[in-house]
Image (cartoon, helix red, strand yellow):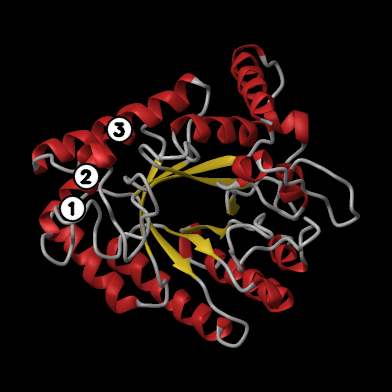
Amino acid sequence: MKYFLILLLIAGLLGAGCRKSTPNQQHGNPGGGNHPNDSFAKGADVSWLTQMEAAGYFFYDSNGVKKDCFQILAEKGINAIRLRAWVNPSDGWCDTHDLVVKALRAKQYGFRILVDLHYSDVWADPGHQLKPALWDSLSFAALSDSLSSYTYHVMDTLRQNGIIPSWVQVGNETDDGLLWEDGRASTNMAHYAALVTSGYKAVKSVSDSTLVVVHVSNGFDSTHFQWLFDGLRTNGANWDVIGMSLYPNASNWADLNTACLANMQDMLARYGKPVMICEIGMPAGAASACQSFIADLVEKTRSLSRNQGLGVFYWEPEAYNWESYGYGAFNANGQPTVALDGFIE
C-alpha cells in the first residue's frame, strides 16, 4: 500500500502538467444533483482515508461494488473534500505530504478542497490547542512568523502540485483561540486576532481567490459566536468566512438545526460574512435520522440571503470500525449508509 501511494502521487504530479481534459470531464460533475452549476458545497472530511487504506480498508458502493471512496462519495452528492493538516505529526499521517496525496486524488474527481490547518502536531479542538513542538519556546513575534511561514509553505506546496484550495481554515474549532497559551482568546484576544490575520495574509499571498475561514464549534451557540467574532473584529482581524460545527443526536437535531440557522442569520447580519458548516456528524446507529438532519441543514444553509450559506461538510463519513469513531456514515461492510442520501437533492 505504501508503494501504491507513492506511485499515485507521482502519477498525479505528472498528470497535473499534461492533462488535457478537466477533472469534471474525466469523472463527471460530482454532487451536481439538481444543481449542475451549483457553487454550494456538499462536502466530506476524509482525512483518515489514506491511513485506512494503508491499514487494508476497502470501500464499496450500495450495491457492494468495490470502488474508490471518492467515487462513492461523488455518487452520494458530495462535491467538495475537506482535509486536515498537522505540522509535524509523529506518524506522518495528515502532514503536508499526505495532504498533497489526498488533494491530488480529490482533484482527479473534480472536487473543490477545504484545507483545515490545525497549527498543531496533533488534534486541535475547543479543549486542545497545543503548539507544534518546534514552536513551543518561541516568542510571540516568532510564533506569528512561524504560523505565517508554515501557512505559506502548505499553500505553495499545493500550488506547485496544481491545487488551489477553495477555502482554508486558520485553525480548527478555535472557540478559545489557538496556539495556547499565547493565542488563547479568553486571555489575549489581541494575540488571537493577530495570529488569524497572519494566517489570512499568508493564504492570500499565494491565492487571493481562496477564502479564509475562522472555525468554531457548537453552531447553535450564538452567544459564544458573538463574543469571539466581536473580539476578532474589535482587534482588526481579517477573515472571509465564519465556519461552524454541529453534532446533534437523533432526538435533538431539529432543535439544533433551528438554533444553528438563527445563528447563521445573526452572523451574516452582524459581520456581513458568509457562513459554512465545516463539520457535522451523528451517531452511526441513527442513519435514518442523520439523513433527515443533513437534508434539513443543507436546506437551511442554502436559505441564507444572497447565497451566503456556502456549504455543509460531514466529518469522516468513511470511518467504519476505525479508531473507535462512532459517527461515521459507512456500515461495517464498508458501504455508505442512508445517512449520506441527505446530500442528494
Q: Is residue 72 left or right of residue 132?
A: right
Residue 210 in the image: state x and y as whole percent.
Answer: 41, 38
Determine the image quadrant of residue 281.
bottom right
Viewer-nearest of discs 3 and 1? 3
Q: Is residue 119 left or right of residue 158?
A: left
287 and 306: which is toward the camera = 287
Residue on which disc 2 sits: 197
Viewer-nearest of discs 2 and 3? 3
Alpha carbon distance from label 2 to label 1: 6 Å
Alpha-carbon neighbours of circle 2 within 10 Å: few (<14), some, or many (≥20)? many
Residue 127 in the image: state x and y as whole percent.
Answer: 32, 66
- Whether residues under marks 3 and 1 lie with C-beta atoms below 8 angstroms apart, the answer is no
What residue lies at 71% left-to-right and 33% top-to-bottom?
Answer: 24
> Is residue 32 shown to the viewer in this render?
no
Dot 1 amino acid type: Ala
Residue 255 in the image: state x and y as whole percent.
Answer: 52, 86
What residue lies at 89% left-to-right and 47% top-to-bottom?
Answer: 65
Q: Is residue 65 left or right of residue 220?
A: right
- Whether residues under marks 2 and 1 lie with C-beta atoms below 8 angstroms apart, the answer is yes
**Which is more N-terminal, label 3 or label 2?**
3
Determine the image quadrant of residue 292.
bottom right
Circle on res. 193: 1
Determine the image quadrant of residue 266.
bottom left
Residue on which disc 3 sits: 150
**Which is more N-terminal, label 1 or label 3?**
3
Quarter holding the N terminus?
top right
Alpha-carbon neighbours of circle 1 within 10 Å: few (<14), some, or many (≥20)? many
Dot 2 amino acid type: Thr
Alpha-carbon neighbours of circle 3 within 10 Å: few (<14), some, or many (≥20)? some
Alpha carbon distance from label 3 to label 1: 18 Å
Q: Is residue 3 above or below residue 33?
A: above
Alpha carbon distance from label 2 to label 3: 14 Å
